[in-house]
Amino acid sequence: MSIPTDKRAMRSAARFYAVQALFQMEVSGQTVEQVRVEFETHRIGAEVEGETWVEADLKHFRKTVDRAVDDQARIDQMTDRALVAKWPIARIDPTLRALFRAAGAELVDAGTPPRVVITEFVQIAQAFFPDGREPKFVNAVLDHMAREARPEAFAG
């Protein structure tokens, strides 16, 4: 893997790692602190068996994971409203649930334009599900979430 050096690539990597960290927290029962330490010590930028994991914007990684955990109830409720009634968040794939929580964290934060958040997380969905319909599903759900969280960004 190439090592990103520009700010945008570092933020993209931080988002990708945040999804992985949130997924790991859910499936392993680890705390946010345990997962953060593991990622910052053994994954982000680490060399494992001759392969180097890409660097990431650690501040953005921490902020995204922390916001996703701190605002999980709010983000999950936004996600539920964006999903079809028959598919509450508890029934969707844990990878997608982690992705929606990380994206939701950025949407409620208001630091990044919603369209950028949507584009970035659709690309992450494509990385996790290269042959599936999930990226289109992610796009639709995040669009709905973004319009709820930041309606002013879509006015006009």
Image: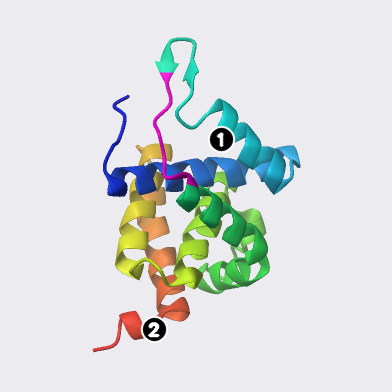
Image side of residue 116 versus residue 101, left or right: left
Residue 61, x across and y down, in percent: 50, 48
Nearest the eye: 138 or 37: 37
Does 119 lie within the magenta span?
no
Q: Mark 1 points at which residue?
A: 40
In the image, what residue occupies the spot 26% across and 43% down? 6
Report, in whole angstroms, how far the alpha carbon at label 2 lies from the one at label 1. 34 Å
Residue 143, x across and y down, in percent: 38, 69
Residue 98, x across and y down, in percent: 56, 50
From the image, state whether disc 2 or disc 1 is nearer to you: 1
Q: Is the magenta stretch mostly helix, strand or loop?
A: loop
Question: In this picture, is 113 found above or below 103?
Answer: below
Question: In this picture, is 27 found above or below 134?
Answer: above
Does 53 lie within the magenta span?
yes
Question: In this picture, is 74 found above or below 39?
Answer: below
Residue 80, x across and y down, in percent: 58, 69
Quarter of the image with the C terminus is bottom left
What label sits on residue 117 in the rendered view? Answer: none
Q: Name the residue under label 2.
A: 151
Task: Categorize mark 1 by other alpha carbons within 10 Å: few (<14), some (14-19), many (20+).
Answer: some
Judged from this view, the residue extending furthest toward the top is 50
Label 2: state its secondary structure.
Answer: helix
The kind of residue tagged 1 is Glu
Image side of residue 8 versus residue 28, left or right: left
Nearest the eye: 83 or 25: 25
Magenta residues (range): 52-58
How many callouts does the rendering have? 2
Nearest the eye: 38 or 68: 38
